[in-house]
């Protein structure tokens, strides 16, 4: 990984910023980090990648909510198992639609929904912010990569003068 330092600086700074913002606004930090990870795990870049992360995670939230809500109407857990199977198949099949093509993003959103007992008000803000966080990390990394040669030449010039 050629640009390890630039990535590390970008990720470290923005992760710290996100942790502080999440704390101040009482947002669930780990949801934002999962959404950010979705941005980096799928193949699209830039704005398209941000929207791919958002849409696949959000579709998973929908499927998780549907499983939890649908299962609550029935006494038998077997119905919940059936809903889980149907939703799992749907998360895989929806990937034929290009904007929902990243299947793990849907599963991440679904798992978040299970972990948060389908509390959409607690799930959605950090989910969207996390995708923006991933995009922001990629932009900052690109900026750091672009200025690295300039910084290196400054230090190389000083070292040569000192010798």
Image: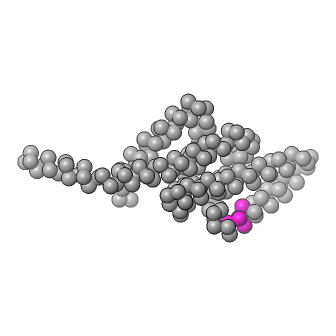
Left or right of 51, for residue 107: right
Residue 94 within the magenta-colored segment of the rendering: yes
Residue displayed at 14% across by 46% down? 158
Q: Kindly indicate the quadrant of the structure image that contains residue 82.
A: bottom right
Q: Is residue 99 visible?
A: yes
Extreme-bottom residue of the structure? 96
- Quadrant where the image shows the N terminus: bottom left
Residue displayed at 73% across by 40% down? 119
- Image coordinates of residue 16 in percent, x first then y, are 47, 38
> In the depicted view, which residue is nearer to us: 21 or 116?
21
Residue displayed at 72% across by 42% down? 120
- Image coordinates of residue 129 in percent, x first then y, are 57, 44
> Which color scheme did the rendering employ for the protein?
one colour
Residue 121 within the magenta-colored segment of the rendering: no
Residue displayed at 55% across by 55% down? 50
> In the depicted view, which residue is nearer to us: 69 or 47?
47
Q: Kindly indicate the quadrant of the structure image that contains residue 95.
A: bottom right
What is the span of residues highlighted in magenta in the rendered image? 91-95
């Amino acid at each position: 990984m050629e640009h390890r330092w630039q990535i590390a600086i970008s990720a470290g700074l923005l992760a710290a910023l996100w942790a502080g913002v999440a704390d101040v606004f009482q947002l669930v930090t780990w949801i934002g980090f999962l959404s950010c990870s979705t941005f980096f795990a799928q193949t699209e870049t830039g704005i398209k990648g941000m929207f791919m992360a958002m849409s696949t995670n959000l579709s998973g939230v929908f499927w998780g909510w549907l499983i939890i809500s649908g299962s609550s109407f029935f006494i038998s857990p077997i119905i919940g198992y059936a809903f889980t199977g149907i939703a799992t198949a749907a998360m895989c099949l929806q990937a034929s639609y290009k904007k929902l093509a990243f299947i793990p993003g849907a599963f991440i959103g679904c798992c978040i929904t299970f972990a948060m007992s389908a509390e959409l008000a607690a799930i959605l803000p950090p989910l969207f912010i996390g995708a923006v966080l991933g995009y922001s990390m990629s932009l900052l990394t690109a900026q750091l990569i672009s200025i690295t040669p300039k910084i290196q030449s400054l230090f190389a010039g000083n070292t040569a003068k000192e010798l």
